[in-house]
Image: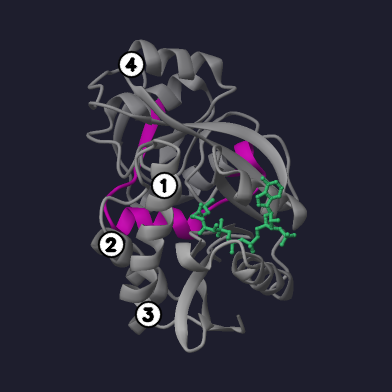
Amino acid sequence: MTIVLRPGTAADATACGTICYEAFKAVCTAHNFPPDFPSPEVASGLLSKLLSHPRFYSVVAEADGRIVGSNFLDERSCIAGLGPITVDPTAQNRGVGARLMQDAMDRSAQRQAAGVRLLQSGFHNRSLCLYTKLGFRTREPVSILQGKPLGLKFPGHEVRSATAADVTACNRICHYVHGFDRRAELRDAIDQKTASVVEHLGRITGYTTGIAFFAHSVAETNQGLMALIGASPEFGGPGFLLPTRNHEVFTWCLEAGLKLVFQMTLMTTGLYSEPNGAYLPSVLY
Ligand SMILES: CC(C)(COP(=O)(O)OP(=O)(O)OC[C@H]1O[C@@H](n2cnc3c(N)ncnc32)[C@H](O)[C@@H]1OP(=O)(O)O)[C@@H](O)C(=O)NCCC(=O)NCCS
């Protein structure tokens, strides 16, 4: 199979989205887990947004003129977020994924990104081994949680919608927790009206771009994080991602009735420091 890589274009959304849906459906069904995307249309809709976003890099793999896979890199911050990477189930395990991964890693090296991060499905041996061979280190087990909105409030931890005026304070929290900020992601979420902040004693102590699969959150304390989760009207996509080692919040979620969907693994290359506070990664990191 001769593989040719090229940049993705808006016209690739349907073909790449169908492969994305089929690839996740095949591996998830084989392990008795629900697929990441409910339909080819939902997967194509997401990839269509990524293909037209000026700060997402995309690469498409073709074999004999037919699209067989794609990969994406979120370049909105100094750390790049990789994914979704998917290969047509009929073309898997023949090196296409490795080519798509190497291309994205070369791109982030060219742009001198401080690192690349991704979330890997914990049950998928092939992706874990592929990423490890390419230099990604396992950092954190992460649980996808889903269920009915909790409708819980914490006195003294007020949650409200985020506005553009909150960005500086939110960036400070993210910097405190992760060592860098994610201002472009936050601005996108404020524009899309999905971002919220939590205030304690008149000060912003945490924010979320949405309690959802494709969104991240940071807070100075677990109380702040639980207030953000408790106030969320829904958990978008397959669920939100909680570092499993955060025992206090994991136990609280389970006692509140949320269900574990499956485990993922946070993997990183380049700069990484242990987060200093409470956080929820997005499915990109
Ligand atoms: C994950 C995915 C993108 C990988 O693409 P692929 O084309 O199948 O993978 P490749 O053939 O390039 O590489 C697989 C590597 O894993 C290795 N591997 C697979 N299973 C392994 C195992 N159980 N133990 C050790 N190594 C293993 C293979 O030997 C190969 O490495 P090699 O090239 O050095 O021999 C593809 O399988 C896919 O689309 N899966 C479904 C969707 C998905 O899970 N996406 C990733 C989300 S995190």
The numbered mark at residue 12 is 3
Dividing the picture into quarters, in which one does residue 230 lie? Answer: top left
Q: Earlier in the sequence, mark 3 or mark 4?
A: 3
Q: Earlier in the sequence, mark 1 or mark 3?
A: 3
State the residue position of label 4: 154
Whether the magenta-drawn stretch holds residue 170 is answered as no
In depth, the one of 13 and 22 nearer the eye is 22
Binning the other alpha carbons within 10 Å of mark 2 as few (below 14), some (14 to 19) or many (20 upward) gives some
Give the amino acid type for the residue marked by disc 1 in the picture.
Answer: Ala
Asked if 133 appears above or below 211 in the picture, the reply is below
Label pair 3/2, CB-CB below 8 angstroms? no
Asked if 151 appears above or below 8 in the picture, the reply is above
Residues at marks 1 and 3, CA–CA distance in whole angstroms? 24 Å
- For image coordinates 59% across by 39% down, the residue present is 265
Residues at marks 3 and 2, CA–CA distance in whole angstroms? 13 Å
Q: Is residue 280 visible?
A: yes
Q: Secondary structure at mark 1?
A: loop
Give the amino acid type for the residue marked by disc 2 in the picture.
Answer: Pro
Q: Nearer the viewer, mark 1 or mark 4?
A: 1
Dividing the picture into quarters, in which one does residue 226 lie? Answer: top left
Q: Secondary structure at mark 2?
A: helix
Split into quadrants, the picture shows ligand 1 in the one at bottom right
